[in-house]
Amino acid sequence: MTFLPIVTRELRVASRRRGTYWSRCLIAALAIGGGFLVYLANDGQAPHEIGQALFYVVAGGAFIYCLFAGVRSTADCISEEKREGTLGLLFLTDLKGYDVVGGKLVATSLNAFYGLLSILPVLAIPLLMGGVTNGEFWRMALVLANTFFFSLATGMFMSAISKSPRAGMAATFLFLLAATLGLPLLVATFPFLDESRNLSHVFQLLNPVCSGICVPDLVFQARSGDFWWSAGIIHTGAWLFLALASVIVPRSWQDHSPGAGAGRWRERWRRWNFGNDIERAEFRRRLLGVNPFFWLAGRARLKPVWVWSALAFLACLWTWGALDNGHSWNDAGVFIPTAIILNCLLKLWIASEAGNRLGQDRKIGALELLLSTPLGVRDIIRGQLLALRRQFLGPTLVVMLVEFIFLLASLKNVGSNAGDVPALVAWWAGVNVMLVADMIALSVVAMWVGLSTRNPNRTTSIVVIRVLALPLLVSAVILIFTGVFVSASNIPFNPDWKFFLALWLLPGAFADAFFGLRAWRGLREDFREVAAQRFAPRPTLWQRLFGPGAAAAPRSGV
């Protein structure tokens, strides 16, 4: 029998897929474009300084790409087989757990791995420019490959122990985030951990960032042991996750009757999430009177509670920082990052939530059944929007109130600089306007993408790229090219705060309007057609990124 037969098959299948080649071309193009922008931004400096800036900027972006590769690639690969009931069929053969885990690992991560390989040549360009040595390049390549492998293994393990796609992806994301940011925050929060050098040092070695910090020659000469120990621990942890997944997978596909204790906890969770029989009946009667799909999408009463809990947790952290730092906490350097964190939390959450119900219902065919009832398309859209309003309206208003308080505090700190008042008012007003505009656009675009895309689990990433990431990229490109043009032409140009505010607001507003209106038109005109075509042809890359979603299957014969 061929060793790892699933891996062999998946490699052959991947070699015939167009996406295998286009994905690495796209990632390489992004790396080249980012490097070109770095070069323009540092034009006029010495070549070795440009090389250093290019190396570390590209390496930083590649590290983030590798760190969260498992969230997109492997966090749902095994749990999807569980939901569809096909995992058990694999074990009717002579396949072992490691065969399935290895095959799934290769099948789901091959495109991402090719993307990483396409970044390395761009990362090697600074070698020709000077400022980066061979040792630094190869150490960084090792760090990226090691982090990539660790992320994939983490996603594989989380997928093996979960059944819900969102649970697996969320657990993978939170674990990786805790490993990189949580451990340093833990050391900073508890002084006794910082004072204990041995324990603090262990936490540093468990962080994937540690080996990346030790890449420069000067740091490596002083901390070579930390580099190798951290890389070894991360690599060993990845193999441990894969070994655990290989043991769990053959035992996780069966449907077991829950024990008495598990049954009680499941019942308690159901009561907490949906209420008891009386509460469910009252809630159902009230929501059905408004909109039937509103009840279907919003019957889990804990969804708003989770958003409020996240805001309460951040409020506790902020209050602790204020008590610990005193008057220095009352500063724009604290207000602005806090506002960014709050806004990003709400935007990413609504992007994840808005398209989930429609995407999953379409995938299993439930949406097609709903459309065979007197329930119309407008009723479904309105019900989903009402569910989102129930979950996010209150937290959004509270965040806007907090940011208004930050504005008042900033105005109080202005003092004699009265000329800064219009800039502060305009900036904080823009923050609130973009929060509302982005959340509306994210809601509509996520609903349409979740409805029309083949894999609903990728809805969030597609929506975030369209509505949030693309405007920031456009703003950065405009800013860099403006600076290069001004410096090359010797034209006197001193942009004030109005220029930078417009540079931030206009691309975001255009993206919200463009993608939001196209998605809204698709929902109103093509909802029934797309919902009924569960096995539509795969859309092109351009359609997935910039089209109204229309995975739009051909209309002929419908």
Image (cartoon, rainbow, N blue to C red):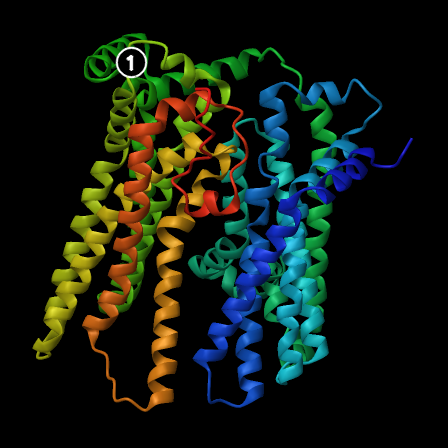
Quadrant containing the C terminus in the rendered view: top left
Q: Where is residue 94 shown, x and y percent of the image?
A: 85, 23
Q: Is residue 443 left or right of residue 74?
A: left
Give above or below for 341 relative to 131: above
Q: Where is residue 406 shown, x and y percent of the image?
A: 18, 59
Q: Residue at x 27, y 54 (%)?
A: 510
Q: Residue at x 39, y 49 (%)?
A: 466
Give above or below for 378 relative to 65: above
Give above or below for 295 relative to 311: above
Which amino acid type is marked by label 1? Leu
Q: Where is residue 217 shown, x and y percent of the image?
A: 66, 80
Quadrant containing the N terminus in the rendered view: top right
Q: Residue furthest right?
A: 1
Q: Residue furthest front?
A: 556
Q: Nearer the viewer, residue 495 or 48?
A: 495
Q: Nearer the viewer, residue 548 or 144?
A: 548
Q: Residue at x 73, y 24 (%)?
A: 250
Q: Where is residue 492 shown, x and y percent of the image?
A: 25, 89
Q: Residues within 10 Å of mark 1 (few under 14, many from 20)?
A: few
Q: Residue at x 37, y 37 (%)?
A: 446
Residue 226 appears in view: no
Residue 210 appears in view: yes
Q: Is residue 6 left or right of residue 552?
A: right
* Residue ID for mark 1: 375
Snapshot quadrant of residue 199: bottom right
SS label for mark 1: loop
Q: Is residue 152 left or right of residue 527?
A: right
